[in-house]
Image (spheres, rainbow, N blue to C red):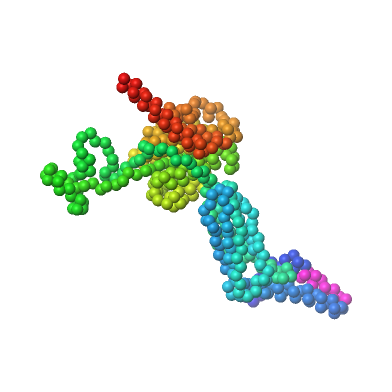
């Protein structure tokens, strides 16, 4: 058992030696061998000194290594594309053991920059050091900072000990957001509850807001005037306000977009969706995000409130949104109680088979806006004969189906195109009004 420990100590010590330290050991052994062969005492002393330095340094670093503590603070933890974030590293020696020179290396994802390296040369006694570095990303996504590796070295550079912390810190880079102007979005309000607004041809509003008593209803809600008139116990309906809801749809199919990297049409579509999400939540809308796969946020609708807390979960979902290899659109959310309200669709080139789904999406919304990316302006890969068959949904086709649609190229301004949606909607209203007047005549 003792022999095994000795072998382990020798192996660990040899692995901890740097090339310089191993050179000292080789030189010391050679000097001792030459001294024994030639009988030179001075050469033997030099050999012993060369061997002693690595041995002493190894024993100090491997037997009693410093007990280090690390804390990492990122501000802000969530940032947009192009926004810098500051990372503060707090490193401390909690037990005061000597550590020699410390070489710190922070693992940083390639998208956030290069690896960060620091040197602490006076690591004696109990101490605390704080270093700061900056990260910036031009690519959205969820990244992880760390872990940090620490290399302890003696002043002579003979021995080096490597250790790695286990702690990491996530950081989310959300898509770039453009400020959108305010346009008229009337017709996108949706009611809910047992007093959901409905049209009535006769009677008063009081008749609509009164219903029969149900077991478990609060007696304080009894409407005695209606009870006396009908002869049955009647109660007032619970009052619920109108709700402003919006659905943001992103066509994330790989076949609908062109280009590669951050300058692709898909990345521009994600940025457009993020801008719309922030704009709508700032106006008090309850927003949900859906994709070409038919998926949506688990909570479906987010409560309106502070813009940061409202848009945050959706922006994080857009930060990790990826393109999918599928041909057909799925829209199970565009039916039943999940439909209604405002619909903003961010579309790519699409396929002829998308026409039916887009019609269903339009009929499920009170107001439907579409931003179609002109993918022909981006770098386009060759298309197969099957993909070229039929007519793809265009901006003109979307308008004939009742969408308020606009096109967007790589150099077009999103705020300007967003404003044109309001102008086209006004023109459509005027056309409908003129047609109604002509029919009335």
Occupied quadrant, residue 25: bottom right
Labels in figure, total? 0
Rendered position, 311 above or below 420 = below
Q: Is residue 121 left or right of residue 380?
A: right
- The part of the chain drawn in magenta is 24-38
Occupied quadrant, residue 120: bottom right
Q: Is residue 245 left or right of residue 113?
A: left
For the point 63% across and 75% down, the residue is: 125
For the point 60% across and 74% down, the residue is: 126
The percent position of residue 286, horizontal first and vertical second, equals: 39, 46
The percent position of residue 175, horizontal first and vertical second, equals: 53, 46
Rendered position, 131 above or below 42 = above
Which one is nearer the viewer's eye here, 293 or 285?
Answer: 285
Assign the C terminus to one quadrant of the image: top left
The percent position of residue 405, horizontal first and vertical second, equals: 46, 32
The reply to whether the magenta stretch includes residue 398 is no
Rendered position, 78 above or below 93 = above
């Amino acid at each position: 058992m003792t022999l095994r420990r000795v072998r382990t100590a020798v192996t660990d010590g040899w692995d901890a030696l740097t090339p310089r330290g191993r050179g000292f050991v080789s030189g010391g052994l050679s000097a001792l061998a030459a001294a024994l062969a030639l009988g030179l005492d001075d050469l033997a002393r030099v050999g012993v000194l060369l061997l002693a330095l690595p041995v002493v340094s190894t024993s100090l670093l491997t037997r009693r290594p410093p007990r280090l503590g690390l804390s990492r603070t990122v501000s802000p933890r969530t940032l947009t594309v192009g926004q810098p974030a500051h990372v503060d590293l707090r490193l401390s020696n909690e037990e005061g053991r000597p550590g020699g020179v410390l070489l710190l290396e922070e693992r940083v994802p390639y998208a956030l920059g290069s690896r960060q390296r620091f040197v602490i040369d006076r690591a004696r006694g109990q101490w605390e050091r704080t270093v700061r570095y900056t990260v910036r990303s031009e690519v959205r996504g969820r990244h992880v900072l760390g872990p940090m590796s620490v290399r302890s070295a003696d002043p002579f550079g003979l021995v080096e000990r490597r250790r790695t912390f286990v702690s990491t810190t996530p950081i989310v880079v959300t898509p770039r957001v453009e400020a959108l102007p305010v346009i008229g979005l009337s017709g996108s309000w949706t009611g809910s509850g047992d007093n959901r607004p409905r049209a009535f041809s006769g009677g008063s509003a009081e008749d609509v807001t009164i219903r029969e008593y149900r077991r478990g209803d609060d007696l304080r809600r009894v409407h005695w005037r209606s009870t006396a008139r009908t002869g049955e116990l009647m109660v007032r309906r619970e009052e619920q306000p109108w709700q402003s809801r919006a659905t943001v749809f992103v066509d994330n199919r790989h076949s609908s977009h062109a280009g590669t990297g951050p300058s692709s049409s898909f990345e521009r579509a994600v940025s457009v969706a993020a801008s719309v999400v922030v704009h709508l939540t700032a106006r008090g809308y309850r927003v949900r995000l859906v994709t070409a796969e038919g998926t949506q946020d688990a909570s479906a609708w987010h409560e309106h409130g502070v813009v940061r807390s409202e848009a945050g979960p959706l922006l994080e979902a857009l930060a990790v949104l990826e393109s999918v290899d599928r041909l057909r659109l799925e829209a199970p959310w565009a039916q039943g109680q999940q439909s209604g309200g405002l619909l903003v669709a961010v579309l790519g080139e699409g396929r002829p088979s998308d026409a039916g789904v887009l019609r269903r999406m339009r009929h499920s919304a009170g107001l439907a806006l579409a931003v179609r990316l002109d993918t022909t302006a981006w770098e386009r890969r060759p298309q197969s004969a099957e993909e070229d068959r039929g007519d793809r949904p265009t901006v003109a086709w979307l308008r004939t189906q009742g969408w308020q649609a606009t096109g967007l190229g790589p150099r077009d301004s999103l705020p300007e195109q967003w404003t044109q949606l309001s102008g086209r909607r006004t023109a459509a209203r005027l056309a409908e009004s003129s047609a109604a007047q002509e029919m009335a005549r």
